[in-house]
Image (cartoon, rainbow, N blue to C red):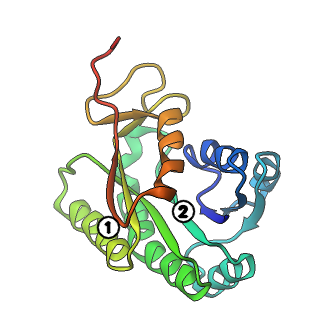
Amino acid sequence: MRIFVAGASGLIGVRLVPLLVEAGHEVAGMTRSPEKAGLLRDLGAEPVICDVFDAEALAEAVAAYGPDSVFHQLTDLPDSVADMASFGARNDRIRSEGTRNLLAAAVEAGAEQLIAQSIAWDQSDQARRTVTAAHEQTVLEAGGVVIRYGQLWGPGTYYETAPPARPRIHLDDAARLTVLALEVPAGVTMVIDDRALGA
């Protein structure tokens, strides 16, 4: 299968790409950062440098690759959780305009499947909840798969050494379970691990 991963240089993306390659898929990894092209190549992906907000360039890039499946692993989050509030509008734009652009590009390219990340916990901010719900609805109305992840923990996350409150999922488990999303029917799937610690 030919798979296009948008957000391939992110925390899940860098773990997902080699798993897809190992499973025998051909993978294109999209990032907006040219300096990350080498990383993606080392992971086994064909690097694609593109900004999801450049709809025309995005459509051309996805069409040129001709994927069977497209993964939406794009976020715009700060390195520090203390800066989360100031990044809210930026991440909302990824979930709204970015999702619309990527979906349109996938449809135009003839991709059979869109798999998009979302979250499994309730957001306290009503505006954030509205954007997230609209993001999911856009994917579902197109016959795609929405993955609701628990709070990520592990290297590079806001919870590097200890798991956060439930719902949660370790990065490595999140990536491994994301591969399985290629086999699930359209709809919402949960990717969480709420076992008791030490279980």
Q: In which quarter of the image is the N terminus?
A: bottom right
Percent across and percent down for residue 21 are 72, 50
Q: How many labels does the image show?
A: 2
Percent across and percent down for residue 36 are 75, 53
Mark seen at residue 136:
1
Q: Quadrant of residue 69?
A: bottom right
Relative to 83, 61 lies left or right: right
Q: Residue at 34%, 76% (x, y): give it.
A: 138
Work out whether residue 75 can be spotted.
no
Mark seen at residue 76:
none
Work out whether residue 81 can be spotted.
yes
| Gap in angstroms between the C-alphas marked 2 and 1 | 14 Å
Q: Residue at 48%, 73% (x, y): give it.
A: 98
Q: In which quarter of the image is residue 150?
A: top left
Q: Residue at 50%, 71% (x, y): give it.
A: 113
Dot 2 alpha-carbon crowd within 10 angstroms: few under 14, some 14 to 19, many 20 or more = many
On screen, residue 192 above or below 45: above
Between 112 and 44, the one nearer to me in the picture = 112
The amino acid beneath tag 1 is: Glu
Between 67 and 124, the one nearer to me in the picture = 67
Dot 1 alpha-carbon crowd within 10 angstroms: few under 14, some 14 to 19, many 20 or more = many
Q: Which of marks 2 and 1 is nearer the N terminus?
A: 2
Q: Name the residue under label 2.
A: 71
On screen, residue 193 above or below 60: above
The amino acid beneath tag 2 is: Phe
